[in-house]
Image: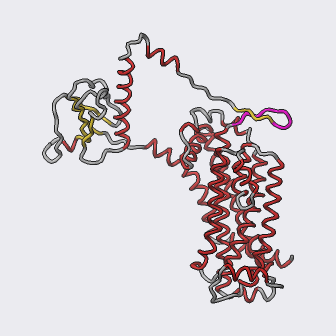
Amino acid sequence: MNKISLIIQQEYLSRVKRKSFILMTLLTPLLFIAVMLVPTWLAEAGDNEHRNIVIADQTGLYESVFTDTGNYSFHYTTRHITPRYDTDGDSEETYAYIVISDNLLNNPKGIVIYSEKQVNADFKSTVEQLINTYLTEEKIASYNIPDIKKLIADSKTNINIATIRLEEDGTEAETSTELATIIGIISTIAIYMFLLLYGVQVMQAVMQEKTSRIVEVMVSSVKPFDLMFGKITAIGLVGLTQFLIWVIFIAGIIFPMGILFGVGKVSTEAANTLSSMQGLSATTLPAGAFDNIEHLINGIHFPELFICFILFFIGGYMLYSSLFAAIGSAVDSEADTQQFMVPVTVIIIVALYLGIYSAQSPDSGIALWSSLFPFTSPIVMMVRIPFGVPAWQIVLSLVILFASFIGAIWISSRIYRVGILMYGKKIGYKEIVKWIKYKE
């Protein structure tokens, strides 16, 4: 045990002192904040160039449709115009020509945009919105129903249903499905990234020691199992250290921003960015869903969430990193890792997709069994917890996960003890099975 602690200490200190670790630890939170806020800043900055648009309305019906906006000035004419940019002396000042050749209620294809360069999406959507709004009003007016616009306006409703979770002690807590979804997605993506990032680091560390022949000296005084376990544990502690620093750093940036700019605004920007990343529809995040964000946050059990994140990170990391360590010990170069890496990587990716699915249906059978299966539970369970999961399911999932990683470490150590000293031989699955069966 003393040798394992020395290995852990040496590996941990050597990694946290590296410049790459320090830079990644400091820059990642800033990158995270930028991902949340830059899209909003870009949307607000937008394209401020002012453009002239010529409306050639051959029907004479749509003069009132086009009104100047901040970016576009519309110049209306009923003259027949054939845009020719090579001969028209004013073409350089005209961004585009809109030619209307027919009644659009009868012929929706009677409008065409001509331009020298491809028009941007904002301009096209602006024109379409103006035309569609006008045609809708015209079609409604054609029904000749008195006060029809008022009737339509009065018939519109906007209901935002509150969700209340009943706690075990009988108290009520207001919650938000949208907020729970976002927290679950953040947690599952974090676990997914950590499993891949630090698992691959374990594999690379084992490969480097094997190719440099340093391990031959080390195993003369330390058992291969102790060496593997110490290395895995040390890199895991490095990951937890980095994660805790990120949490403190991000909280130290977001909370002051929430005070200065309004918690609801900052939270909504983050929510919209995350929802677009996972492809949620606009109806998933209704307007006003985060107006009472501070109150809704109280409905999330963050201490339970944080403890579960740490436990599932440890269990998932130890399970997968033991497999990565076995892969690193069985091969001589990174090119040889592909045949062994593919199955492990596929399982992690499948777990991510199951986690995203579980965010939509956290109580489905697939979500339940995926959160208990050890190779997917670290990712899937973290999505389900913000929605409220019975304690027995969390405990059972952790018991299965920790029992599985202990078994995985035992199997991987038997591969490690042989593979770490094996050089210059192409290894297949049959050979690895033989290594596991070798006696001490």
Viewer-proximal residue, 306 or 312? 312
* Residue drawn at 59 percent across, 79 percent down: 336
For the record, the magenta segment spans 167-175
Q: Residue furthest left?
A: 87
Question: Whole-percent x and y of residue 158?
Answer: 57, 25
Residue 201, compared with residue 54, is above or below; it is below
Residue pictured at 32% horizontal, 28% vertical:
67
Image quarter where the N terminus lies is bottom right
**Does residue 12 appear in this view?**
no
Q: Quadrant of residue 375?
A: bottom right
Which quadrant, please, contains the C terminus? bottom right
Name the residue rendered at 21%, 44% in the picture: 92
Tell me where residue 346 sits by quadrant.
bottom right
**Percent x, y for residue 18?**
65, 72
Residue 182 vs residue 35, the one in the foreground: 182
Q: How many marks?
A: 0
Q: Is residue 304 visible?
A: yes
- Relative to residue 436, is residue 345 drawn left or right? left
- Residue drawn 29% across the image and 33% down it: 73
Residue projecting furthest to the top: 146
Residue 45 lies left or right of residue 67; in this view the side is right
Image x and y of residue 144, in percent? 37, 13
Q: Judge whether residue 427 is colored magenta.
A: no
Rendering coords of residue 431 (x, y %): 69, 83
Q: Specify whether residue 169 is painted magenta.
A: yes
In this picture the colour scheme is secondary structure
Residue 418 sits above or below residue 150 on the image: below
